Image (tube, grey):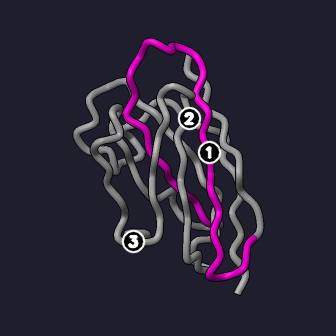
Amino acid sequence: QVRLVESGGGLVQAGGSLRLSCAASGRPDTSYVMGWFRQAPGKEREFVATISWSGGSTYYADSVKGRFTILRDNAKNTMYLQMNSLKPEDTAVYHCAATTMPATEPWRVGAYEHWGQGIQVTVSS
């Protein structure tokens, strides 16, 4: 079983930055495609970014492209989301996700079988 734990959320003013972390444990010899999703109140969970096992391939939602950067350190079993130039519309619960399956559409919620519990990010105007 894979366990994912997010950290680094909080309250920040518009234009500020936050760095989220996602620590993975369990099945250390398994490679994962990992991603970040977010869910605002009353809205569906939406894709933010994804990263391949090697870290050499990344993909972002248009709404965060150029502002957010997804990274991973496999030696530490940790994935990161560096969020800059934050906007109030970025306010949401952010979830990390992982899959051991071939992720041909890694922007889909259904592509992932492992999820963290989520962490709140609030951006004030």
Q: How many marks?
A: 3
- Disc 2 or 3, which lies upstream in sequence? 3
Where does the magenta region start and end?
A: 12-40
Tag 1: amino acid = Ser
**Which secondary structure lies at badge 2?**
strand
- Disc 1 or 3, which lies upstream in sequence? 1
Q: Indicate left or right for 101 with 37 as reference.
A: left
Tag 2: amino acid = Thr
**Which secondary structure lies at badge 3?**
loop
- Disc 2 or 1, which lies upstream in sequence? 1
Q: Give me the disc on residue 84.
A: none
Mark 1 to mark 3 CA distance (whole Å): 19 Å
Q: Which residue is mark 3?
A: 66
| Contact between labelled residues 3 and 1, with CB atoms less than 8 Å apart | no
**Which secondary structure lies at badge 1?**
strand
Tag 3: amino acid = Gly
Q: Give me the disc on residue 78.
A: 2
Q: Indicate left or right for 125 with 57 as reference.
A: right
| Residue 91 in which image quadrant | bottom right
- Say which quadrant the C terminus sits in: bottom right
Residue shown at 54% from the left, 43% from the top: 96
| Residue 103 in which image quadrant | top left
| Residue 106 in which image quadrant | top left
Image: 35 above or below 40: above
Q: Position of residue 39 (x, y in %)?
A: 57, 59
Q: Give me the disc on residue 21.
A: 1
